[in-house]
Image: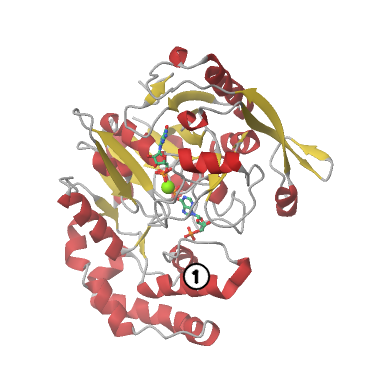
């Protein structure tokens, strides 16, 4: 069976967690392939009695909530072990079985000094800051590339771990003390902290690439779930206002050890409007009452840091770019219900930069900073759409909105979210291959 990739189409928080959870009953493995606990995926599960249970996942793949799924933390992820075990304990307390979780021996761990560095670097940057989540993500990926990272497999041999921490701290303590004017990290304390997790971690650790290849050979369905999103990707995003990992479809292969030839489908999750957390350019951003309405109605406050999300209209230049970079086969448009009640719903179809029209993402960062959206103003709708379960049940103007966006982004819209709950979705085309 093939592997399926699921990515975020914009700047994150599109509803990837909900979409993954939706597919949970039909897939065998859900693999997180990039990022760490900078992610925040909210999944809302409705009980038969109408109650709603809300889960906020940061490090664990969203598939952990589906009883038959094997959740996998791939080699491309950076793991904060304290967060990992807190999240596991939190779920176990709520009756979720986490015993199937497996973790790649090659995933990197976030050592405590990188959490410190992330925060002091941001402070040091002042008004040039990125607005990171402060979880140590950037410094840990930098260590990986600098070949002074600590991997999950290093935790099981104290001598090796000590050598690696010493090598890392030779460099990093210079940075902490001499550049950022803060305290040096102590090798013994770091080794002790990391070793304290080793026994609990050991039974979960595997060659996950091998396990996943065997699963594919045995006709299992593997879903590769991105953290973050296309425009936060370190290569293809709005650099330098990005995260430090590969959040696009290409990253799914490097971050899991599954080759591109096994990927059959790429599903992108696209919010019906746009949001962004942290700094960086955002052409369709709204600073008026409409922006406030989107934030309030869409509950746009960060799952990880609680920061209010910046809000704006749908940008189909970004949509087209996402289709191209990821090879998107299917889109899921989420939160269409949040657009209910606007007289007109603007859709950005192109940019104008210094009097020149751009139909594609400008390659030059300064141009993107100056891009002014060219809007088409579509007619809005007033009906509550949260109960709609077929496309035809949607008000005509909501249908027209979806069809126009579909035309502009260049790949089919296979599902439409009409509420946060697991079942509040319209499926137009099957998301999984037969
Ligand atoms: P992720 O990081 O991509 O998984 O997205 P987040 O969980 O950070 O943010 C998406 C939010 O929108 C969550 O609170 C979801 O419960 C919610 N959500 C997802 N799909 C829909 C939808 O179709 N309608 C509404 N109203 N909320 C949704
Ligand atoms: P999910 O998976 C939205 C943003 C941060 C910051 C930038 C770099 O929930 O969609 P980092 O801590 O990664 O070095 O921060 O990336 N960011 C996200 N924004 N959703 C996320 O994840 C994000 N993960 C990181 O706000 O601008
Ligand atoms: Mg999120």
Quadrant holding ligand 1? top left
User: Is any part of residue 380 visible from this angle?
Assistant: yes
Q: Which residue is mark 1?
A: 146
User: Is any part of residue 9 visible from this angle?
Assistant: no
- Residue 312 shown left or right of residue 32 in the figure: right
Q: Quadrant of residue 327?
A: top right
x%, y% of residue 354?
Answer: 83, 46
Looking at the image, the residue that sits furthest to the front is 289
Graded by Cα atoms within 10 Å as few (under 14), some (14 to 19) or many (20 or more), the crowding at tag 1 reads: few
x%, y% of residue 337?
Answer: 46, 29
**Of 377 and 405, which appears nearest the observer?**
377
Which quarter of the figure is the C terminus placed in?
top left
Which quarter of the figure is the N terminus placed in?
top left
Compared to residue 362, the image places residue 414 above or below, namely above
Compared to residue 138, the image places residue 48 above or below, namely above
Compared to residue 191, the image places residue 237 above or below, namely above
x%, y% of residue 53?
Answer: 25, 40
Q: Residue at x 40, y 75 (%)?
A: 113
Q: Residue at x 69, y 27 (%)?
A: 376
- Residue 42 shown left or right of residue 145 in the figure: left
Disc tally is 1
Looking at the image, the residue that sits furthest to the right is 355
Q: Residue at x 31, y 50 (%)?
A: 60
x%, y% of residue 353?
Answer: 79, 44
């Amino acid at each position: 069976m093939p592997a399926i990739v699921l990515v975020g189409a914009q700047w994150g928080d599109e509803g990837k967690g909900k979409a993954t959870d939706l597919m949970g009953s039909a897939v065998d493995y859900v693999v997180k392939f990039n990022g760490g606990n900078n992610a925040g995926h909210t999944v809302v599960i409705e009980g038969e009695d109408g109650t709603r249970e809300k889960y906020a996942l940061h490090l664990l793949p969203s598939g952990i909530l589906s009883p038959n799924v094997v959740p996998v933390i791939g080699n491309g992820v950076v793991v904060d072990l304290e967060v990992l075990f807190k999240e596991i304990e939190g779920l176990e307390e709520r009756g979720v079985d986490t015993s199937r979780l497996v973790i790649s021996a090659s995933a990197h761990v976030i050592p405590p000094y990188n959490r410190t560095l992330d925060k002091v670097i941001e402070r040091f940057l002042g008004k040039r800051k990125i607005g990171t989540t402060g979880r140590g993500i950037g410094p840990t990926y930098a260590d990986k590339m600098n070949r002074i990272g600590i991997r999950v497999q290093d935790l099981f041999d104290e001598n090796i771990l000590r050598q690696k921490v010493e090598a890392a701290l030779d460099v990093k303590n210079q940075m902490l003390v001499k550049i950022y004017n803060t305290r040096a990290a102590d090798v013994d304390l770091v080794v002790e902290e990391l070793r304290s997790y080793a026994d609990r971690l050991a039974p979960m650790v595997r060659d996950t690439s091998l396990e996943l290849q065997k699963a594919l050979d045995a006709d299992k369905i593997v879903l590769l779930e991105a953290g973050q999103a296309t425009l936060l990707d370190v290569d293809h995003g709005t650099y330098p206002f990005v995260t430090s990992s590969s959040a696009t479809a290409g990253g799914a292969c490097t971050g899991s050890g599954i080759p591109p030839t096994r990927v059959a489908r790429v599903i992108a999750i696209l919010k019906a409007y746009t949001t962004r957390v942290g700094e960086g350019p955002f052409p369709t951003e709204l600073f008026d009452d409409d922006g406030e309405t989107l934030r309030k109605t869409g509950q746009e406050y960060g799952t990880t840091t609680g920061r209010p999300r910046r809000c704006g209209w749908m940008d189909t230049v970004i949509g087209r770019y996402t289709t191209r970079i990821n090879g998107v086969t299917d889109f899921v448009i989420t939160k269409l219900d949040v657009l209910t009640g606007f007289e007109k719903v603007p859709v950005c179809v192109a940019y104008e930069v210094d009097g020149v029209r751009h139909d594609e993402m400008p390659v030059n960062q300064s141009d993107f900073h100056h891009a002014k959206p060219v809007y088409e103003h579509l007619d809005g709708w007033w009906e509550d759409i949260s109960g709609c379960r077929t496309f035809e049940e949607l008000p005509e103007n909501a249908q027209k909105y979806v069809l126009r966006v579909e035309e502009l982004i260049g790949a089919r819209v296979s599902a439409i979210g009409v509420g946060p709950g697991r079942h509040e979705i319209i499926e137009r085309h099957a998301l999984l291959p037969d």
